[in-house]
Image (cartoon, rainbow, N blue to C red):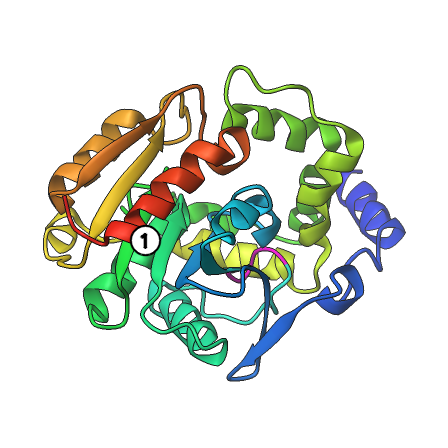
Amino acid sequence: MLTVASFAYNEATDGREQPATALYAGPFVSVDGTRVAYRRWGRSGSPIVLVGGFVEPSWVWEKVGPLLGRRHRVVALDLPPFGYTLRRGPYTLARWVELVRAVSSRLHLVRPLVVGHSLGAAVAADDALVHPRGVSGIVLLDGDALPVGGPHWLAQLALDPFYTSVFRIATGSDWIVGRALRSALGPHAPKQSHAALQLWEQPFRVAGTAAAFKEMLESGVPGLSLAELRRVSVPRVVVWGAEDSVDSVTAGRTTAAALRSRFVVIPGSGHLSMLAKPRAVASAIDRAATTRTAR
C-alpha cells in the first residue's frame, strides 16, 4: 500500500521540477557549461564574493549585499546543487572552489575577499589554501570549515519511489521547512509567512535537485581538517552568531584558534546571522575588506 501510495503521489506531483531559468530570471554566468546564478551590488571599490551554505540561495545576502555595495563591488553566487545554478556535479570542495574562481574571473573581480557562510566557509578556506595569491582574504561566517560525514548507508536506502516522495514532501512543506528555518534563525525569530517560506522551497523544484541531494548523501559535506586550516596564510577572520544552535560558538572558536584569527561574535543572532543582524555582519565583512590584515 505504501508503494502504491508513493507511486500515486509521485505521479500527481510530476512536473514539479522545472529548469532554473523558469524559476529565476537571472543573472547567470556560464562556467564550463554550468550556468551559475548570481546577484550583485555596488559599482566601485574592492571586490567581495559571498558564498552561501547548505540549501542557501544567493538571496540570503539581500540585506547584507546592499550595505556592502556602498563601498565595494559585491557578488553572491549559488553553489550547486543549491539556489538556481545548474545541477551539474561533482559536488565537491574542489569543484566549488573552481566555480568561485571562474565566476570571479568572468565578472572581473580580481583578488576578492571571499566570504563563506556555513558550508561556504570550507569553500572560502580551501580557496585561500590552494590559491593564496588569488584572494585578498577570507571571512568564515557561522561555519567551521570542517567536514560533516554521514551514515553512508542512508544513501542505499534512498530508493524510489519512496525517496522522491519523501524529498518532495519535505521540501514543499511549510511546516517542515519552517521548523528548520526557525532553528537556523535563532530563538527570537518571528514566524515566517508562506511567501517567505516559498523563497526557500522554490529552489528545491529546480530540475535535478533530488538526484543531486542523493549524490551528496553518499559523500557527506566536504571540508578541511584543522591541520589544513593552520596552513591558511591569507588575512582571515571568523564571525559567529552568539546564539547559533546549528554550529556552536565553541566550534567557531576552535576554527579561529586553528586559523590564528580574530573571532567576532554577533549578539542576538543565530546561524543565519546575515538575515538576523545584517548591519553587524556587513560591518565585520567591511572591516575585513578594508584592513585586510590577519589578526
User: Magenta region's main secondary structure?
Assistant: loop
Which residue is depicted at the point 39% across and 39% down?
283
Which residue is depicted at the point 61% across and 56% down?
83
Q: Is residue 259 left or right of residue 114?
A: left
Q: To which residue does mark 1 refer?
A: 289
**What's drawn in magenta, residue-wise?**
78-83
Q: Is residue 62 above or below residue 96?
A: above
Q: Is residue 177 left or right of residue 60?
A: right
Relative image position of residue 276 (x, y in whole percent):
52, 29
Q: Is residue 248 above or below residue 228?
A: above
Q: Is residue 152 above or below residue 111?
A: above
Please tell me how crowded label 1 is: few (under 14), some (14-19), or many (20+) other residues with Cα within 10 Å. many
Q: Is residue 123 left or right of residue 274?
A: left
Relative image position of residue 265 (x, y in whole percent):
31, 27
Residue 79 sits inside the magenta stretch: yes
Residue 141 sits inside the magenta stretch: no
Relative image position of residue 123 (x, y in whole percent):
34, 58
The amino acid beneath tag 1 is Ala
Q: Is residue 132 left or right of residue 29?
A: left
Relative image position of residue 246 (x, y in whole percent):
41, 29
Q: Secondary structure at mark 1?
A: helix
